Image (cartoon, helix red, strand yellow):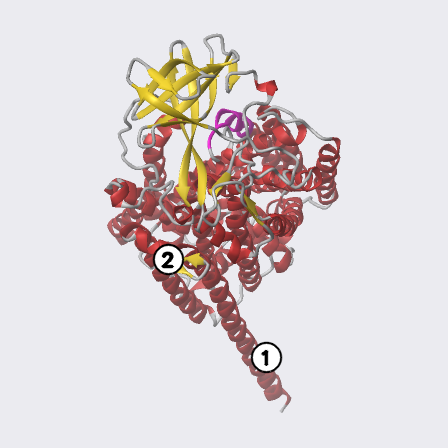
């Protein structure tokens, strides 16, 4: 679809960016020491830190990715909300206070507190860098996604803009500014998500959602088929001329022409009808046609509606609703979802988007993205993939470096615990809202089929440019804040863990801060490049990978150091290494990566699953146990966190 | 450069009890979460079962979010009470020793 900038959107956007930079400038003047740069001096109040946790965590993946996935797949997108929130239980009950007790600036500090091992310092730093970069990719993709409708700029400009602003933020003030940016953005995100859900419920649901009367909803047509063979098709509407067929996999598409405009229709053999699709044709010279016309003509429509409400299929509307009646209406209706398939037609590549009428009961139940029902063709590997994803989401949160370093910004272990509880309450509320924002986008005719990540901002746009500008600017600040946190974590890994500790470069406070800032610039540049390369992928899906890598590489080491006395330094090193290699190996050799990253057509990947946690997490745990047992004779048994008296000597 | 803990570490007598409570809490949550994931895989049709205006899938999902919040509040209450009690005992012990010197 076409996007154009509005002056109001630009003004609000600049105001938010200006505020963020103002906060950075304010704290830059106060940040002179390494502790100030990496841990905000440990002086953040737990309530502020709790909201900042929410700010860190409710990243582009949550706001853009989850809402987009719910808008396209219904309940399966909400599974991410459930898994992301569940992960905080591990963070609170297992990790929060011990991390605060054991560490100073980075997650490596805590891991290494008992061993003083060069190997742990190196591997923890490498793991932090890799997880941070994996997590950075979807944030940058989200930034590019947002800036297009907000400012009318291309994706690449958005990525570049975020990269530059974040580098300025992090390279000037570090963790203090990042914390207050996150606090501001986390608060605004919750408030305006509540507003958006209120507006969705107020508007109600219609079979012809016209965005509050502002945009006429395109009525997708069907045409009766008299006969259809591989060579010819005869249709009832004679105003169309049949010009060909596209057969791909089990699908039959018929190409029609009317007034010189070509269109593609999907053949429904059961009902003998053609249903209208949308398509993007890429010609040999690279020119793209949207539904047979240039993009500027605006003939590629936003979608998302119910074809049946309370048994009525004609124009039906249901007015203001509450949380219960909204889901009930969807449950009892039929939602038109959209599938996509690519085909080669002569010397053109055609991406065809076709309608999938889906019962409301299926929309608010699992199974539309993740195949779990054997009766619908789910294979054991599909089920394992689903379980693996849920494991990664559950275990990944407590092992994310940019979340872990936030425990060092408060004064005490009790404050770390309390800030985690504030985070759980705030994040829990937001994730409940994601279901309604996602379903709202699904039924309000706002989905851009070429980019599901835009669903929530476009839902806001359907209520007016002001709310859209505010929501988009907050989402942009969301990306800024999360990327800032990730870059602080990455720069800590390089400057503190590697340069200062591993290479023993004996940096002064000033040099350590300078090294962190230089690293921030380099990591920021890498993030910009990756954000452009991974443009088309769903951000929540990408974050799922970051969680899997964190859960596999970091969590086994954290848990075993805290709770198993026989853990040795070599066991920890081996566990992190194996966790990293196993999780990355599975991801890089999975079908999803083959299809969406390498763009290999009709190539079967060697790994049957895409989510590695179900294999890589146990392997990492087992490696730690085996190596620790094999190397323990040379080591003195170490105390665990439960040995209160022993911790004093840590 | 000092790489030790970010806070001045004092002997926290409450650590063992807090850790035990944390493990109990996380175990309960893991159990409920595992049942949720298992139901999705083994009997996805059950997740479509109507529960009022909603269905089991949504109610269970909201329930998991709510359970996390409730457990967090209970855990914090428990830990805070332990810490306050330990602090009071420390203060009492400190007063006693001072008192002893005075006598």
Q: Residues within 10 Å of mark 2 (few under 14, many from 20)?
A: many
User: Gap in Å between the C-alphas at discs 1 and 2?
Assistant: 42 Å
For residue A10, the mark is: none
Residue A99, image x, y percentages: 48, 55
Q: Is residue B60 magenta?
A: no
Q: At 46% across and 19% down in the image, what residue appears?
A: A263
Mark 1 / mark 2, whichever is N-terminal? 2
**Residue corresponding to mark 2:** B33
Q: Quadrant of residue A381?
A: top left
Q: Quadrant of residue A481?
A: top right
Q: Is residue A649 visible?
A: no
Q: Secondary structure at mark 1?
A: helix
- Main SS class of the magenta portion in the image: helix
Residue A187, image x and y in percent? 64, 51
Part of the protein shown in magenta: A526-537
Per the image, the residue denoted by label 1 is B91
Q: Where is the N terminus of chain A found, in terms of image quarters? A: top right
Coordinates of residue A343 in the picture (x, y in percent): 37, 19
């Amino acid at each position: 679809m076409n996007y154009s900038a509005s002056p109001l959107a630009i003004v609000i956007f600049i105001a938010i960016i200006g505020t963020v930079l103002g906060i950075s400038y304010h704290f830059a003047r106060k940040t002179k020491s390494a502790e100030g740069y990496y841990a905000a001096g440990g002086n953040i109040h737990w309530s502020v830190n709790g909201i900042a946790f929410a700010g860190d965590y409710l990243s582009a993946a949550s706001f853009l990715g989850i809402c987009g996935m719910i808008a396209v797949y219904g309940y399966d997108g909400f599974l991410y909300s459930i898994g992301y929130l569940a992960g905080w239980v591990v963070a609170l009950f297992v990790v929060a206070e011990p991390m605060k007790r054991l560490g100073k600036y980075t997650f490596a500090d805590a891991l290494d507190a008992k061993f003083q091992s060069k190997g742990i310092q190196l591997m923890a730093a490498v793991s932090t860098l890799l997880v941070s970069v994996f997590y950075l990719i979807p944030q940058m993709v989200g930034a590019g996604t947002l800036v297009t409708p907000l400012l009318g700029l291309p994706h690449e400009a958005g990525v570049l803009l975020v990269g530059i602003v974040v580098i300025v933020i992090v390279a000037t003030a570090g963790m203090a500014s990042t914390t207050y940016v996150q606090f501001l953005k986390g608060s605004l995100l919750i408030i305006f998500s509540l507003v958006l859900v209120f507006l969705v419920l107020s508007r109600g649901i219609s079979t012809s959602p016209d965005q509050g009367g502002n945009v006429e909803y395109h009525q997708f047509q069907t045409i009766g088929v008299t006969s259809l063979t591989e060579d010819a098709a005869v249709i009832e509407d004679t105003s169309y001329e049949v010009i060909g067929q596209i057969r791909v996999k089990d699908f039959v598409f018929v190409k029609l022409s009317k007034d010189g405009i070509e269109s593609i229709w999907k053949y429904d053999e059961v009902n003998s009808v053609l249903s209208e699709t949308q398509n993007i044709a890429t010609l040999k010279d690279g020119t793209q046609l949207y539904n047979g016309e240039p993009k500027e003509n605006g003939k590629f429509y936003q979608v998302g509606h119910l074809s049946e409400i309370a048994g009525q299929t004609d124009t039906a509307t249901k007015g203001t609703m509450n949380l219960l009646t909204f889901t009930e209406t969807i449950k009892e209706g039929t939602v038109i979802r959209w599938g996509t398939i690519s085909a080669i037609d002569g010397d053109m590549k055609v991406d065809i988007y076709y309608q999938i009428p889906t019962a409301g009961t299926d929309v608010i139940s699992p199974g539309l993205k993740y195949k779990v029902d054997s009766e619908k063709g789910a294979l054991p590997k599909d089920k394992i993939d689903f379980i693996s994803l849920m494991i990664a989401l559950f275990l990944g949160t407590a092992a994310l470096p940019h979340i872990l370093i936030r425990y060092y910004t408060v004064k005490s272990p009790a404050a770390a615990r309390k800030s985690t509880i504030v985070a759980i309450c705030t994040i829990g509320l937001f994730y409940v809202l994601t279901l309604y924002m996602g379903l709202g986008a699904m039924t309000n005719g706002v989905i851009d089929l070429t980019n599901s990540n835009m669903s929530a901002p476009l839902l806001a746009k359907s209520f007016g440019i002001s709310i859209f500008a505010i929501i988009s600017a907050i989402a942009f600040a969301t990306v800024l804040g999360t990327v800032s946190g990730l870059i602080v974590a990455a720069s800590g890994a390089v400057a503190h863990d590697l340069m200062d500790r591993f290479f023993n470069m004996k940096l002064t406070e000033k040099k350590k801060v300078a090294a962190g800032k230089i690293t921030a610039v380099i990591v920021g540049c890498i993030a910009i490049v990756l954000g452009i390369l991974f443009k088309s992928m769903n951000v929540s899906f990408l974050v799922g990978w970051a969680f899997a890598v964190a859960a596999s590489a970091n969590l086994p080491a954290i848990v075993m150091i805290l709770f198993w006395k026989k853990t040795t330094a070599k066991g920890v090193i081996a566990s992190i290494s194996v966790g990293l290699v196993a999780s990355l190996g599975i991801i890089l050799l999975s079908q999803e990566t083959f299809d969406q990253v390498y763009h290999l057509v009709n190539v079967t990947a060697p790994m049957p699953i895409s989510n590695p946690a179900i294999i890589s997490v146990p392997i990492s745990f087992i490696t730690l146990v085996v190596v620790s047992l094999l190397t323990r004779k040379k080591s003195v048994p170490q105390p665990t966190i439960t040995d209160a008296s022993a911790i004093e000597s840590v | 450069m000092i790489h030790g803990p970010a806070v001045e570490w004092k002997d926290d007598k409450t650590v063992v009890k807090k850790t035990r409570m944390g493990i109990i809490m996380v175990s309960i949550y893991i159990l409920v979460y595992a049942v949720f994931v298992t139901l999705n895989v083994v009997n996805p049709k059950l997740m479509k079962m109507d529960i009022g205006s909603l269905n089991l899938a949504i109610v269970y999902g909201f329930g998991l979010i709510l359970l996390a919040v409730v457990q967090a509040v209970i855990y914090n209450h428990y830990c805070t009470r332990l810490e306050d009690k330990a602090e009071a005992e420390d203060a009492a012990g400190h007063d006693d020793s001072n008192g002893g010197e005075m006598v």
